[in-house]
Image: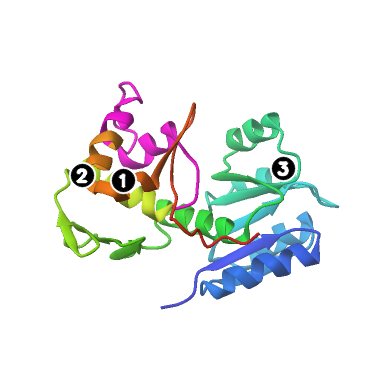
């Protein structure tokens, strides 16, 4: 199968190389642009870019200008990278059609996990049929879950919820994100319904239910006992 192309746009060559190395280890093809103008030219030259990692602060054209230009013609998934960490920047990015927003410094492996998740949501990458983490095995084709070799019975939503957590392991997920991903925007009630489903899911998972961590005031995170993250 042909590799998915990701364009990394950042004026720091060291940052581009770091991100490129991690993405290529995950079998992505990586294109690089050192400024906004080069990024726009490259995007329209290469017709099959699957995702863009876009820095905000750059010479010639900044990330916002690049984003506006590309969004006139394409809905390609875009993850913005910024050193600011300013809430106003985040809101601006989402209003302009950003799919994810990551502040520097970041763990490259978490960045790759975000890329994987965004590509799955966009349909560019098909979800793995079997995913595993910390003794939990999820067979998406057979719709079966086993923990340390023992099958457990889950409802449809519990299965989808656990799959979403494991696919996004190590990433803090807000209740809104979980609701949108698992309930597919078709649920209009209280987002706290997630808490009820998580409680039931944890109880069915036994000791492994403790891997689903509560982030107070926000949501949840699936955390493996020995997370494999870059420092």
Q: Are marks 1 and 2 in contact (CB under 8 Å)?
A: yes
Quadrant placement of the N terminus: bottom left
Which image quadrant for residue 126? Answer: bottom left
Measured as percent of width and height from the top left, residue 188 is found at 31, 24
Q: Are marks 1 and 3 in contact (CB under 8 Å)?
A: no
Measured as percent of width and height from the top left, residue 33 is found at 74, 64
Q: Are marks 2 and 3 in contact (CB under 8 Å)?
A: no
Within the magenta stretch, is there residue 171? yes
Measured as percent of width and height from the top left, residue 153 is found at 14, 49
Crowding near the residue tagged with mark 3, few <14, some 14–19, many ≥20 C-alpha atoms within 10 Å: many
In whole angstroms, how far apart are the C-alphas of marks 1 and 3?
41 Å
Q: Is residue 139 above or below residue 94?
A: below
In whole angstroms, how far apart are the C-alphas of marks 2 and 3?
45 Å
- The reply, left or right, for residue 193 in relation to residue 3 is left
- The reply, left or right, for residue 3 in relation to residue 35 is left
Most distant residue in the front direction: 207
Within the magenta stretch, is there residue 91? no
Return the residue at label 1.
209
- The reply, left or right, for residue 187 in relation to residue 23 is left
The residue at 17%/60% (across/down) is 150
In the image, the segment drawn in magenta is 169-197
The residue at 29%/48% (across/down) is 207
Q: Earlier in the sequence, mark 1 or mark 2?
A: 2
Q: Which mark is residue 204?
A: 2
Q: Earlier in the sequence, mark 2 or mark 3?
A: 3
User: Which sits in the foreground, 12 or 151?
Assistant: 151
Return the residue at label 3.
64
């Amino acid at each position: 199968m042909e590799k998915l192309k990701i364009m990394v746009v950042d004026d720091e060559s060291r940052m581009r190389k770091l991100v490129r190395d991690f993405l290529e280890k995950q079998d992505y093809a990586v294109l690089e642009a050192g400024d906004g103008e080069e990024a726009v030219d490259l995007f329209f030259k290469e017709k099959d870019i699957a995702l863009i990692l876009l820095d905000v602060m750059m010479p010639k054209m900044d990330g916002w200008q690049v984003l506006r230009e590309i969004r006139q013609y394409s809905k390609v998934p875009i993850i913005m990278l910024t050193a600011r960490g300013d809430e106003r920047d985040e809101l601006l990015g989402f209003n302009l059609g950003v799919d994810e927003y990551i502040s520097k410094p970041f763990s490259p492996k978490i960045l790759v996990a975000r890329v994987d998740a965004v590509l799955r949501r966009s349909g560019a990458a098909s979800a793995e049929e079997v995913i595993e983490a910390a003794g939990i095995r999820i067979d998406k084709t057979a719709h079966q879950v086993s923990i340390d070799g023992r099958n457990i019975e889950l409802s449809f939503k519990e299965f989808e919820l656990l799959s979403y957590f494991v696919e996004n392991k190590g990433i803090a997920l807000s209740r809104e994100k979980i609701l949108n991903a698992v309930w597919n925007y078709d649920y209009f009630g209280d987002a706290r319904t997630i808490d009820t489903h998580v409680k039931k899911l944890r109880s069915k998972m036994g000791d492994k239910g403790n891997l689903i961590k509560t982030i107070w005031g926000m949501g949840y995170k699936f955390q493996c006992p020995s997370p494999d993250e870059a420092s």
